[in-house]
Amino acid sequence: MKVNVMEKATVVIIGGGATGLGILRDLSMRGVKALLVEKKDLGNGASSRYHGLLHSGGRYAVKDKEAARECIIENKILRKVGKSCVEPCGGMFTRLDIDDEAYEELWVKGCADSGIEATPITLDEALKLEPRLSRKHLKSAYLVPDAAIDGFRMAWQLIDSSKRYGGQFKTYTEVIGFDTVNGELRGVKVRNQFTGEKYEIACDIAVNAAGGWAGIIGKMAGVEIGVQPDKGTLIAFNQRIVNHVVNRLHKSSDGDIFVPHGSITILGTSSMSIPDPENTSTSREEVENLIKIGEQTFEDLRDFRILRTFAGSRPLYIPPGGAVGRSASRGFAIVDHECDGLKGLFTIVGGKFTTFRLMAEKICNQICAKLKVDTPCRTAEEPFIEEVSQADKDKAKKYFPSYGMELAADRLGAERFKKVVERLESNPESRELVCECENVTRAEVEEISKDDTSFNVDDVRRRTRIGMGTCQGTFCALRASAIFADTCGESTAKDSLIRLREFLQGRWKGIRPVLFGRTLRETEMTRAIYELSMNVTGGKPR
């Protein structure tokens, strides 16, 4: 296939998840001309389809102490440099009467050996902190420094940081091949997902950071990569059931982590080896299994309304003869494919979301050694974005609803926050709420919609959280779609209707497996609004 060479970068990074974005930021800060390509939007894979846990390392303190030590170190770093992405809610490990008592002793020792502060508390103290815990089954509890972290928010803050140092990126740009000559990489062939245009980006080095898709990218280059996509299903509840991240104190298994995020709680996760990393479907059976396990910790779990379910694909590194599934290591591997006869291609695979910065630092050290760049890594010291000043917050208070100002400040960062406040100040109409659940104003939707990386309403959703709250888009989908059409100049009413359908369909995918109880009744209301009243689907069934 002949394609035109249209661009050039020293390093091309393949994959817009946390690891790829961390590599882009690190290289850019070291003065290396780097460009990242992602076939969909940023954070499309496991970096957003997970429980949002910033690990203390406690989960790995028994079976993988190296991963545990990496987690606690990176936990402390990300709380500092990614402050506005982190909710420092703390964590609690709880052992139930059905859990192995001998494991608790191993775990306490493992935490001590790994440098993780695990503080024992009494049952009364545990129940005071987490009143919904099972009084019948609870046997012991410990506090650990777990936290919650917003993967979507962090992705865009990493991009903003990279851009300050000259980093470039392209979304909806799919890798379709490589240009090699005599065993040496010359460029990466890509295709624009919207126009179908194919072209080549010339480069000296390419980094395969495609997560669960790393094996597919490797095959394009003629190299084998030991990666096994491992699907994890999660459930989002419409209430903050827990105040801390609550883990079961037993050998890692399904459905044993509850993570609070804003006003909701995420229960996860399962582990299922799959052949295709694109498989993010979930079944009613998977949901029921997670609930059955979860209600061992919280007996009244079924009393809470489920918002939706979702799934992601972990990229587990499987060395020759290695274990799979939950037995596989959560460590990471870096491969320089010069040993496979292809100079200029690197692959990084495995690891955890919590350790993405460390993974990026390690591979960037190797890349910079090849490029003879001796600038040290600074990603552990410099914050992702400039914090919004108190003066700007005070100025904005008169325009935002209740606590919406703080939420917007965390989401947007200083530069975008100022632009949104200017809109609110100059145009009273922009103060209307588009999404009541997440306190998102019209001004914020307009600001994100006009960004040249926003190609559809779902792109706006990932950066503002419209449609991710209680109503799951029932009331904000129409408003957001109309604003997107106005801001982006949709050429016809048909185009804007397509965007609305796409948005609703995305919400429907996660709701369908949990259609029972209150979720079913409220979904019928949504269907009545968009299908029966507005005929959005044009008479076609979903």
Image: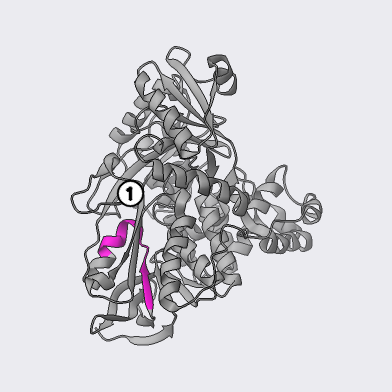
Which stretch appears magenta? 205-216
**Can residue 99 be seen in this snapshot?**
no
Task: Give residue 301's position: percent from left, percent from top.
Answer: 45, 24
Residue at the top extreme, as displayed: 136
x 71%, y 49%: residue? 405
- Quadrant location, the N terminus: bottom left
> Residue 75: image x %, image y %?
53, 46
Query: Would you place residue 92 above or below residue 153 in this image?
Result: above
In front here: 178 or 339? Answer: 339
Q: Is residue 441 magenta?
A: no
Query: For residue 215: magenta?
Result: yes
- Residue 384 x/y as whole percent: 60, 59
Q: Is residue 327 in sight in this rendering?
A: yes
Rendered residue at 72%/45% (across/down): 401
Q: Which residue is mark 1?
A: 280
Q: Secondary structure at mark 1?
A: loop
Closer to us: 141 or 218: 141
Q: Residues within 10 Å of mark 1 (few under 14, many from 20)?
A: some
Q: Who's the residue at 29% across and 47% down the image?
A: 230
Q: Across the whole image, how many numbered discs are drawn on residues?
A: 1
**Relative to 47, 475 lies left or right:** right
> As rendered, which of 459 and 367 lies closer to the eye?
367
- From the viewer's perspective, tell me whether residue 480 is left or right of residue 34: right
